[in-house]
Image: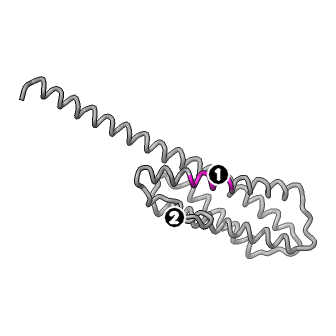
Amino acid sequence: MTRYFKITVLTSLIFILVHQYSLGQDTSKTINGTWQTLKTQLLRRTGLATRFEKVLEQTQNVDTILIRQLKTNTTLLNNLLNYNQRLDSSIVTNIHDKNDSLSRLIRNGFDTLQSDKNFTRTEEFQDITIQLEGTGNRIYIAVRDFNEACKSIGRQDLYFKKLWGDEP
């Protein structure tokens, strides 16, 4: 082989390696960015769930079991989101499951309030209701974006499974 050919091949290999490294960095940034957005919205929901618990505690027909479950689930989801540094399929599945449970408990709380004839819709309650709805919409979009980012690099193992009946 000629010296020119060797230099050309070596230069091409270096270019390919640098390009693949750069592509990997971009992909990692995309997943991390979409994950941070999703995590922010899920943390927002845990904060709203805590406020919602306080509204439920003030009702005449207090459902102490529901409130205890809400508190426990909120704390568990909050801990999962705040104290896990790595992102793997088991953590994503755990976070999804806790978020799904929290969503069901919040719905049950709204059902409880609707059946309570003496419940007065306070300004705080209306504010929480509006914010929970908005957060739910932002979570839906963040999950969709996160799943698309995972799909683009072949990491379907990180999918946020079954979002309101949808398959990713």
Look at the numbered disc 1 and give the secondary structure of its residue: helix
Residue at screen point 49% across, 59% down: 159
- Amino acid type at image mark 1: Gln
Residue 150: x %, y % from top left: 46, 53
Quarter of the rendering containing residue 115: bottom right
- Prevalent SS, magenta region: helix
Q: Which mark is residue 93?
A: 2
The magenta stretch spans residue 138: yes
Q: Which mark is residue 41?
A: 1
Q: Earlier in the sequence, mark 1 or mark 2?
A: 1
Would you say 62 lies left or right of 154 here? right
- Amino acid type at image mark 2: Thr
Would you say 51 lies left or right of 149 here? right
Q: Is residue 105 above or below residue 29?
A: below
Magenta stretch in the rendered image: 137-144
Colouring of the image: one colour
Would you say 14 lies left or right of 120 here? left
Q: Is residue 105 above or below residue 78?
A: below
Residue at screen point 87% across, 69% down: 59
Residue nearest the observer in this picture, 33 or 124: 33
Q: Which mark is residue 27?
A: none
| Mark 1 neighbour density, 10 Å: few (under 14) some (14–19) many (20 or more) | many
Residue 144: x %, y % from top left: 57, 54
Residue nearest the observer in this picture, 68 or 154: 154
Residue 73: x %, y % from top left: 65, 66
